[in-house]
Image: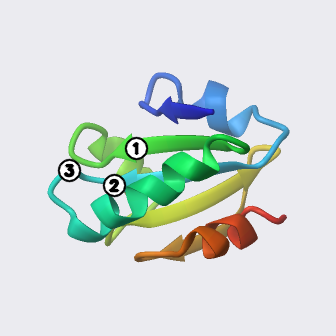
Amino acid sequence: MEHTLTKANFDEIVLKSEEPILVDFWASWCGPCMMLAPFVEELSKTRKVGKVNVDEEPELARQFNIMSIPTLLVFKGGKLVNQSMGYQSLESLQALMEV
């Protein structure tokens, strides 16, 4: 299941989730983000996924010190448990979620 994350719903969807959730920080002008998008969408069919558009949610990007995109953060039980930057394969995304 894929969620559009905002400052208003981030705590509820991400930090209060007991199951792992992949948070994708992206932007529409980012080539590697667009290349990664189909894999994130595929992963969302079986895992919990959230997307943060850094242009629309700059406060969330600052809160997590996002310096380049795509940046992928994995949260479980309200804690950051894994992270990755840059383009990833579907297999890498799946492995990132194994926490």
**Callout 2, which amino acid?**
Trp
Taking the spot 65% from the left edge, 25% from the top edge, the residue there is: 12
Q: Which residue is mark 2?
A: 26
Q: Which mark is residue 28?
A: 3
Residue 18 drawn at (x, y percent): 85, 38
Residues at badges 1 and 2 in contact (C-beta under 8 Å)?
yes
- Regarding mark 1 in the picture, which secondary structure is present there? strand
Taking the spot 57% from the left edge, 50% from the top edge, the residue there is: 42
**Callout 3, which amino acid?**
Ser
Whole-angstrom CA distance, mark 1 to mark 3, is 11 Å
Residues at badges 3 and 2 in contact (C-beta under 8 Å)?
yes
Quadrant where the C terminus sits is bottom right
The numbered mark, 1 or 2, whose residue comes first in the sequence reads 2
Whether residue 95 is situated above or below residue 53 in the rendered picture: below
Residue 92 drawn at (x, y percent): 63, 75
Q: Which mark is residue 52?
A: 1
Q: Is residue 33 left or right of residue 76?
A: left
